[in-house]
């Protein structure tokens, strides 16, 4: 079995929602692992005769829309959670480290989720059934393994979704979380219809001109801190209008800050009206950037974390606080 401890828990979760309609909830600013997990879980639930929809606080990103089919519709909270449209429904959250990741409207509509399936180190165990493995490379890896362990159906559409999630969350099978199990499961998915060539083209070979302008602005903003061990880039308020982009176009930018030789932690800061969002990436899990993010109310993985501050201080003040927190973490690891 791929997940001998988790698969029985997953079976218990499936039994607990039998006969109830289920909303599969993903996080705001969804990525490939989030969308892939939602589609895959929704299709398996539907195969068991369970009415299912997918709900996200933000639309499915352009580059991942190729995975969506009419059988697994996606809805924004305002489209699906108002009035009595989801009366009697329960919810399973995927790829969400805490209850707030689905957004306030979703949290208020589903205050007691039936389940949570996730691989974040900072998961808060907020559901009735929490299936969490921080050692897994992706939530899609967990789902793929548990589906196979339990003999659940993985058709071509499900395989494509799961493969896309694993591909993106492993950085195309480059990150330290990638294990022999990851490759074995990817091979199983390809055998069931997933296409590495399709995923590579749809996700990585269809950048917009605006995205390149946004990348140019980000690269020009890069500065190094902490004896060149950290690199920080900033996207100021108004940059999306200026470049003709949207927040989803920030996907992958922070990796340019991390990839510089000698840099151990890369950071992308997004300035918003009255708010600040930041993404942190590390080359070594010992850096525990999730702990840095937690100082500002965020969380995530040891090598990939984020935060989103409402009523934030000024950009200059936040940047100074973040540099202090990064310096402290770098010193703690060195010592």
Image (spheres, rainbow, N blue to C red):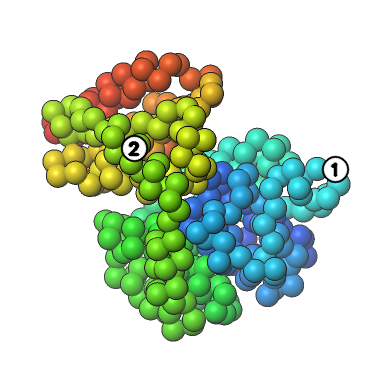
Q: Residue 218 — which label?
A: 2
Nearest the viewer among 225 and 54 is 225
Quarter of the rendering containing residue 110 = top right
Query: Residue 155, percent across and down?
Result: 57, 79
Q: Crowdedness of circle 1 by 10 Å Cα count: few (<14), some, many (20+)?
A: few
Residue plotted at (55% across, 66% down):
66
Residue plotted at (54% across, 53% down):
61
Side of 218 where 98 appears, left or right: right
Side of 139 where 225 appears, left or right: left
Nearest the viewer among 19 and 267 is 267
Residue plotted at (27% across, 41% down):
257
Query: Residue 153, percent across and down?
Result: 58, 79
* Residue 139 visible somewhere in the drawing: no
Q: Classify mark 2: helix, strand or loop.
A: helix
Give the number of the mark in front: 1 or 2: 2
The N terminus - image quarter? bottom left
Q: Residue furthest bottom?
A: 191
Of pointers 1 and 2, the one earlier in the residue sequence: 1
Q: Classify mark 1: helix, strand or loop.
A: loop
Q: Crowdedness of circle 2 by 10 Å Cα count: few (<14), some, many (20+)?
A: many
Side of 221 where 249 appears, left or right: right
Distance, label 1 to label 2, CA atoms, is: 42 Å
Query: Residue 302, percent across and down?
Result: 32, 44
Q: Residue 83 — which label?
A: 1
Quarter of the rendering containing residue 331 = top left
Residue plotted at (52% across, 35% down):
241
Quarter of the rendering containing residue 53 = bottom right
Side of 78 where 245 appears, left or right: left
The C terminus - image quarter? top left
Q: How many marks?
A: 2
């Amino acid at each position: 079995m791929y997940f001998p401890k988790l698969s029985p828990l997953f079976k218990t979760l499936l039994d607990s929602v039998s006969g109830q309609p289920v909303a599969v909830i993903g996080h705001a600013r969804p990525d490939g692992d989030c969308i892939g997990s939602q589609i895959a879980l929704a299709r398996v639930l539907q195969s068991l005769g369970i009415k299912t929809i997918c709900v996200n606080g933000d639309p499915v990103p352009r580059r991942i829309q190729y995975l969506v089919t009419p059988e697994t519709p996606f809805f924004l909270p305002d489209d699906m959670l108002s009035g009595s449209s989801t009366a009697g429904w329960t919810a399973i959250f995927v790829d969400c480290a805490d209850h707030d990741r689905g957004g306030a409207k979703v949290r208020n509509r589903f205050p007691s989720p039936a389940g949570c399936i996730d691989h974040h180190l900072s998961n808060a165990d907020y559901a009735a059934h929490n299936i969490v493995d921080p050692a897994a490379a992706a939530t899609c890896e967990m789902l793929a393994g548990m589906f196979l362990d339990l003999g659940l159906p993985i058709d071509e559409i499900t395989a494509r979704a799961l493969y896309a999630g694993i591909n993106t969350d492993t950085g195309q099978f480059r990150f330290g979380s990638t294990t022999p199990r990851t490759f074995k499961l990817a091979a199983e998915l390809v055998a069931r219809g997933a296409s590495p060539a399709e995923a590579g083209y749809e996700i990585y070979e269809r950048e917009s001109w605006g995205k390149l302008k946004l990348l140019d602005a980000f690269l020009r903003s890069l500065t190094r801190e902490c004896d060149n061990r950290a690199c920080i880039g900033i996207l100021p308020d108004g940059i999306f209008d200026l470049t003709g982009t949207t927040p989803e176009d920030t996907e992958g930018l922070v990796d340019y800050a991390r990839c510089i030789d000698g840099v151990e932690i890369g950071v992308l800061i997004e300035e918003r009206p009255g708010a600040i969002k930041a993404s942190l990436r590390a080359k070594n899990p010992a850096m525990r950037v999730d702990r840095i993010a937690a100082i500002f109310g965020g969380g995530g993985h040891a090598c990939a974390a984020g935060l989103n501050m409402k009523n934030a201080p000024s950009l200059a003040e936040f940047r100074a606080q973040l540099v202090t927190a990064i310096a402290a973490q770098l010193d703690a690891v060195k010592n």
